[in-house]
Structure formats: structure tokens, C-alpha cells
Amino acid sequence: GMGEVYRAKDPRLGREVAVKVLPGDVAADAGRRERFEQEARAASSLNHPNILTVHDIGEVNGSVYVAMELVEGKTLREIASGEPLPSKKLLEIGVQIADGLAKAHAIGIVHRDLKPENLMVSKDGFVKILDFGLAKLVEPESQHLSVVPTAVAPPTQPGTILGTVGYMSPEQASGQPLDFRSDQFALGSILYEMASGRKAFQRKTVAETLTAIIREEPEPLAQIAPTTPPPLRWIVERCLAKDREDRYVSTRDLARDLASIRDHLSETSASGGLASLEAGPRHSRKIRIAVLGLGVLASVLLAGVLVGWRLARVELPSFRQLTFRRGPIWYARFGSDGKTVVYSASWNGRPTEVFVSSPESPELRSFGLPGADVAAVSSQGEIAVLLGSHSGAFDLTHAGTLARMSATGGGAPRRVLDDVEFADWSPDGRELAVVRSVGGRRRLEYPIEKTLYETTGWIGSPRLSRSGDLIAFIDHPNLGDDAGRIASIDRTGKKTVLTGVFETADGLAWSPAGSEIWFTAAEVGSSRSLCGVTTSGRRRLILRVPGSMTVQDASADGRTLISRDQTDLGLVALVPGEANPRDLSWLDWSLAMDLSRDGKTILFSEAGAGGGPGASVYVRGTDGSPAVRLGEGSAMSLSPDGRWALAILHPTAEAQLVLYPTGAGQPRPVPMPGLRVLAARFLPDGERILATAAEPGHLSRIYLVADLARSKPRALTPEGWGGGLFPTDGRRFIARGPDQTLAVWPIEGGEPTPVRGVGVNDSVVGWTDNPSVVYLQRNSDSLPVRIDRLDLSTGQAVAWKELMPSDVGGVAVVHVIKISPDGKAYLYFYDRSLSDLYLVEGLK
């Protein structure tokens, strides 16, 4: 739109060229002329087969021109024409675009107007990047580009928007300074469009499109173009990250990743197994996902190993089983002597303890610390442990008092810090990095009291690099949800996001050589695989086995500790008129959520592999009749009349509420604009709901939705208040505050009243027939689960009942969901975790 282009012939060399001319009346505009000349200078400085070659620039009779290479072919817009391209062709084109951009970015040139119209594909398949008219010279990409000034004068004024709407990056659409990662976003938009046939961001007006680019996520490729190779979908997601820090550190790495998929496309399709490496949907799992196990192991481990991006043929690793008891293993570390293994586990239904064992013997020795977890082992022979380790009803972390003790187990532990969730030693064994909760936010501190990173989500598995200059961790955006991505941070607090978001990610260690971060993650369900990622974001699959595993530790001599895990979530209901409860579990992760007033219907989610991507919402009769799937999402609450099921969808990071009919009818969305919903529940009138939700970058609060179709949600609490399925009697609700205390809040407004007589690990699970008395579940980590009747006016509690599944083997946690006011019906789910610990050698 800046000049006219003519087909011409160079009489000196006898070649045809394209001549772009800026007419005289336009050339008089100093700004447009400068941009035109800037385009020529930028393009002429680039010598790359995928960038249009500039031969000459000049002026004749007041008209400025530039002579360029003539490309015989079509624009990418003409080739795609609104239809998806085959993956092979898409990757051929994408690799060439990325190669050209990498060359430009390496010498400090950003295109800033990348779009299908500016990409020509020649008759022989070569891609040429055209029109550097909006290019802007910056420092080479090894510098901190987001903060450097432009190298041309006058610079673009802050707030000026240049580029083409629909392919702009969020920072470009909001008029912020740009760097090479803006081009990565544009390339992600182009790849998305080529894969799906749809634009990533297209709305009715320019203003709406710009708003979508800045605030909204495109529809996942997994849904609209499911045949797209999963690694390519992950690359597109990373390029389209709103925060440029979440994109590629180098465009050269982006080009290499695309080339790797292109070169192994047939292997990717044949294996069908790279889905675990894709950034999956943000499905919320509300319970403690501990390490989970399957029984017999030796043959199945060898059957599934080494399906990777390059499917390299290597020697199979060896596995030596270290544990032989029944229960979950929480954490395991190599001892400082290089011979022993220290781990924490809950064997045979007993409280968690710290044990030490040797690969040469199945015998184990307890440290005599019931209720403790091992956090880390130092090079100086000290162990960091979490005393009084516990988890909340809907919290995925264990927290306790950090203490130091000798690795020999002698002497009492020395207490260091309260409310710590994770810890790791520095390489010299002198300092500790910790994750702890402060004011409702999770902090990563290194050393203690120096905050490097803070989040409203949670931080998992922090591990210091072997040199001590970086900490790798799992960044989980939502509490109560183990979906997360791998990140690293240096001692100055500079954070680098290395992967997209996995549906489940648990377990992390630095590779034996220290050049990679090894982690276990999966797209759907709990079947985590072992993956590796470099500090530049290059990722690969290392090991996959049937079932799930968690990487616990890796030593410098090449050994790795991996727990082989199995988890089953089961649900149990007591029906009115019956003496004994029934186990009504359906598939592998039956997550109970609500029981109807008459006790005849349960609402639950299938949150594991059986539930599929995004999980599934089910209703089932308590008579044992087959379950009925209502749709995708996480179940939340049944309407009082039983006609509607409230659920949360997770197609993007912004969770959405939906009403599913339990009989005939169509789903109805519940608007929650600008909020990420974490939990929701019907009020007894069936016309209103309470929801725990959070604005981006803020802590959660409780909201009232008075009109399910139109009303704007109204905040009832300050930030930091929330919880799981908070109990309500229609006039009041009970929520947990940022200091983990419970309080009764009036729905119609007023000050909260603290709940007396409860501990930080206790949960109110319902109201009794008496409006002053509630049902209280005592510490969910203790078994059997004790339920008291608590008088809110006095704080006095009276024991009511103990609950426990008939088969207690491996049951780690029981969560009571609902008790009828008269106590004649109840619903709970249990987490059965079984783990075996293995010493693995030969992983590469």
C-alpha cells in the first residue's frame, strides 16, 4: 500500500526484475519516503534465499524506486485461499519463513508486518519474504530487545500502531516497543491459519480484533484441526503466547523445531505418540495428584521406551526396583554418599514417613519422623525435611515446617521456616531455595527471604542447576490444578518459560550432564512421560511407558530415580434408607462433586484418561445404573431441582461456566467476563450461584451471580478468599482466607465471622438441620476421615462419624463432598495411590 510495483527488464544484465516506485506526490511526504528507503536498506542488508533480494535503489524525476528480484509464483494468501494446507506443505513453507526471519533477527531487523500477502511462494516451492517497509532496526537479538531504543531516527512514538490487524502481536496492537518476538507471534498466526483455514484472531471490527489479540486466546488447533501434528500445535501455541517472554528465546530455535517436525513427519504420524509433548487444554483437576502406580513392571517398561522426536535407536535403559510395599511415594532423592536413597512414603495406610534404603537391599530404615516429607539432600550430608507435612482439601501441594537434620538420621531436626511446600539445596550445600505461601501467593525464594518469583498459582519441584546459577521449576497457573509449564529463573529474578502448558506436570530434575531439565508431564489424564528441555527451549521425549511415572532425582553419574505410579479416584455414596454406602466409581478418575436433594443422583467428573481431553461431566443414579455423559468439562454443582448441572470448561486459560441439562435440552453458557473461574455452586434457590474466580494477575475472590444469563458477577469478598466447593445455606457461605482460616460470610453483605474450633487442615463440608451447626471434616491426610458436628456459635465440636472405603490399600486422601442436613446421605471420593520406586540407568 506504499508504492506501485512494475514488471521490468534490466537491459544491462538482461534479467527481469520488479520495480517498486513511490510516486512523486507521495515521495514528497517525508515520513512515507523515509519508510520506503528504510525498506530498501533493510532488505538490501539481508542475503538469504528466503528473503527478497534488492538490486538497486535510486531516484528519477522526483520519484524514488527500488529494483528487486522478480518472483514468479503466488502469495501465500492465494495458495491457502481459506483452506487448511496439508501438514507436509505447511511445514515446508513454515520452515522457510522461520529461516528467513532468523537471518533478519540475527542482524537486528524486525519485519513488523508479516502476513500471507507478504509471503511469495515461487513455482519451484521457494518462499520469499517481501516488504520490509515496516522493518525497524534494533540491537541483535542476543540483547534485551524489549527495552532498547530503536536505531533509526526518528523512532516510532509510543502508542503508534503499525502493521496489519489480525497478524499483530499483543505488544504491537497496544502500541508498545517491539522486538523480534513480535514477528514470531505473526508467524504463529500464519501457521495457525494454514493449519486450520481460519484466522487466529478475526472479529467484526478492527477494535474488536485488536482486543482479541491482546486479551483472548484462539480456539485450540486440537479442536478445529485435530490432524495437525501435536508438536506443531505446541509450537503455534508458544508463538501465540500473550507474554513475549513465553515465546522463543531465539528465532533460530523456532526454525530448528519446525525443521525437526518436517524431517520426522512420517515418524510422528506413525508413532501417534507425540501428543504427550503438546501443550494440552487447561483442564482443572481438583485433588492432590500424588505419584500413582501400576503393578508388575519389568516387561511393560521395556515395551514403551524410547519413542521420541527423532526415534533414535539407542540401548534400552535398565530398571532396578527399590520399593516393595503398598502405598504412595511422595518424594525421593539420592543420598549424599551416592549409595543410598532417601524417600518419603505412606506405606500400608500409615502416616507419611521418611525412609532410607540401598539399591543392594530391599530393607528400609525409618527416620522416626511420622508426618514428615523429604525435601532435599545436600552435598554436605544434610537432609531438608518438611515436618507436619499436610495438604489442603483442594491443594496439590504438601506444606510443613522446613527443618534440617543429618543424613544419618541421628539427632533431632532443627526447624528453619514454617509453611514451606518445596525446598532444594545449593550445590555447595550451604543455602536453600524454598517455595512457601505468603499472603495467599506462592513465592520462590533463594536464598530464604530473597523473593525471585511470585504467583497467584503455585510453584512445583524447584531444582537448582549443578552450577547453581539457575533454578528450574514447574509453573502452575491455577491452584488446585496440576496443569503447568516448565520455566527457569536466574538469581536476579529473570524468568524464562521453556515449554507450553501440560495438563499434568509433576516431577523435575536436572539431567546427569546438567545440560537439560528433565520433567514428567502429559497432555491427557495422569500418564506422564519423561521429557527433556534445554534452557533455550528445545524439547524432546526421553521415555514413555504404559501408565504414569514421576521423575524424582538424577545424579551426575547417570542414574535416575523414577516412581512408577497408579492412581484411581473412586466415589462412594450413602443413599437415604440404606445402612451401607455404595462404591459408584465409573472410569479411572471419578471425581465426585454433588449429590441431589433426594439422594438419587450424583454429579461427577471423569478427570483422567477415560474422560478424554478437557475431562467429562457425568450424572449417575445412586441405584448403580449406568452413568450418562453430559459434555466436556469439570463438574461443579447440581441445581436444586436436578435439571441442570453446572460445569467449568477449559478450552483456554480463561475457564468458562456452562449449564448442562440433565435431560433434554441444550447447554447454556453462564457469562463471567474477565474472570477465570475456579469453582462454582448453586444456591438453594436455583436462580443464583456462588463462584470462586480471579481476574488476571489477581488472587481469587467469591462472586455472586444473580442472573445466570445477563448479570455481571458481584464480588462478595476481598482478594485471597476462595476454596473448593464452599458450603452455603442460601444466606451464608463459608470460605477460606489468605491466612488459611475459615469465616462465615453473609451473602447480602456484611462482615465475616471467624469459624472457631478448626485447624488449618480442617474443612467445613455442609450445614446440618440446625442453622448454627455445620459438618466439619478433620485433617484430610489422616485416615479414617473423622467428621464432627461443629457449633458455630461456641466453637465446640462433637464427633459424628468416621468414613473410609472398604478397601483401604493405598488410599492416601478422602475428600467428603456433601452430607445431607439430616445426615442420612453423604458423598465422598478417595484417592488411591500406589507407587514403586525404580533406579534407572542408561537414560540419554
Image: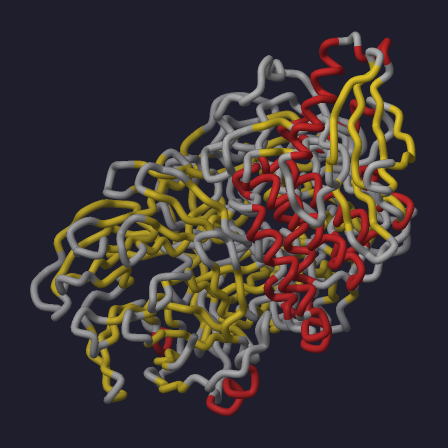
Question: How is colour applied across the structure in the image?
Answer: secondary structure
Q: Nearer the viewer, residue 438 or 94?
A: 94
Rendering quarter of residue 188:
top right
Along the viewing direction, whichever of 351 and 334 lies nearer the viewer: 334
Q: Answer with left or right where residue 470 lies relative to residue 58.
A: left
Check the image and name the residue furthest to the left.
Answer: 411
In percent of the image, x 84 and y 23: which residue is there? 21
Left or right position of 806 against 318:
right
Residue 453 position in % (x across, y down): 39, 39
- Quadrant where the N terminus lies? top right
Residue, x 78% and y 64% (percent of image)?
A: 88
Q: Position of residue 782 (x, y in %)?
A: 37, 63
Whole-percent x, y for residue 671 in the image? 75, 34
Q: Give the residue drawn at x 68%, y 50%.
A: 236
Picture quarter containing residue 36? top right
**822 lies above or below 559:** above
